[in-house]
Each structure stands twice: as structure tokens, then as C-alpha cells.
Image (spheres, rainbow, N blue to C red):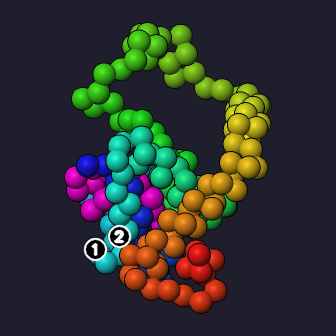
Amino acid sequence: MFYTYLWLREDGTPYYVGKGKNKRGLELHYRRNKKWLSPPPLERIIIYPAESETEAFETEIDLIWYYGRKDLGTGCLRNLTDGGENPPNWKGKKRPEQSKRMLGNTVTLGLKMSKETCSKMSKTHLEKFSSTMGPALRVERAQAARLAMHFRWHVNRDIVKEGCVHCVS
């Protein structure tokens, strides 16, 4: 069973989103910047069950996009990526043929790129991402995230709240 999980601070705001299986959402996480992220108490963990791993990754990407990342200055999450890494590590997984070919590539191994090259690559990536994402898709994802939160806070608790767009219909 795959799922997406959301870790909440004491004030109820989220600080980490991840995709998990089994006990992944309850374990310590080691981040790239050499810091540990500790899971909160069980009452501050939200689980979004998924039908498949792909669906769990999609939910992870949507939630990270919706809440934003601290390191990019776009939100409150401590996530260091936009989510959806498949797989997050290669232990026990089969590598695609292209990846196998790159393993023997010693030409670019350890190659340091200039700041100018890095900024050009970053600019190209941002242009490509923003053009594929499009404003309509961003709005659609935001609506899906709001609906998911509505289910979390109202439907699952049998609460009908005045002023909630989703409770009225």
C-alpha cells in the first residue's frame, strides 16, 4: 500500500510532504544537507492513501506545489525537491538502459561547472517547467489540493461549515 503523508507542526501548519509505503511516514529522514527530520507525534501526521505508487507521487507533487518550499521562498515546507522522484534511491531497483550507460561515463565524472553554466541550465529548466506547467494546470492543482483539505477537515470529521465552498454543494 502506497500513500502520501504530511507532517504538521504544533500549530497545524505542514512542514514536510513525502511518499511512503509501510512505516516510511513514521521514520526519521536523512536530508541532503546532513540534517535529520524527525516525524511528529501520530496525531500530527496526515496520510493520503493511494491506489498506486504513481498516484502517491502525484499527490506528493501537488501538495509540495500547493504549500511551497522554504528553500525556494515559496512556502512553509522543508522539502528540498518538488517531489515525485521515482525511485528516491536505486537500492534494489533495476536501472534503465540509459542509466547503465551513464554509470561508466568517466568523462563528466567530478566535472565542475562554472556559475554561468549553472545559471544558464537553471534558466532553461525554469523556462521549460513554467511552459509545461501552464497557469491552467496550476489552478487545477490548487483546486484539487483545496478539495483534498476539505475532505480532511470537513468530510472525514462529518462537519458542515458555513462559508466553505465545498460544504455548500
Is 20 magenta? The answer is yes
Is 86 magenta? The answer is no
Residue 80 coordinates in the image, percent (x, y): 52, 51
- Tell me: residue 105, above or below residue 155: above
Query: Residue under circle 1?
Result: 42
Residue at position x 35%, y 43% from top?
52
Is any atom of residue 130 visible in this view? yes
- Tell me: residue 108, above or below residue 73: above
Query: Residue under circle 2?
Result: 45
Within the image, what quadrant is residue 26 found in? bottom left
Determine contact: label 2, label 1, CB under 8 Å: yes
Residue 29 coordinates in the image, percent (x, y): 34, 55
Residue at position x 45%, y 62% from top?
16
Of 163 and 125, nearer the camera is 163
How packed is label 2: few (under 14 Cα within 10 Å), some, or many (20 or more)? many
Highlighted range, magenta: 15-26
Q: Secondary structure at mark 2?
A: strand
Residue 168 shown left or right of residue 83 in the figure = right
Q: Residue furthest front?
A: 169
Residue at position x 34%, y 57% from top?
49
Amino acid type of the residue tagged 1 in the rendering: Leu
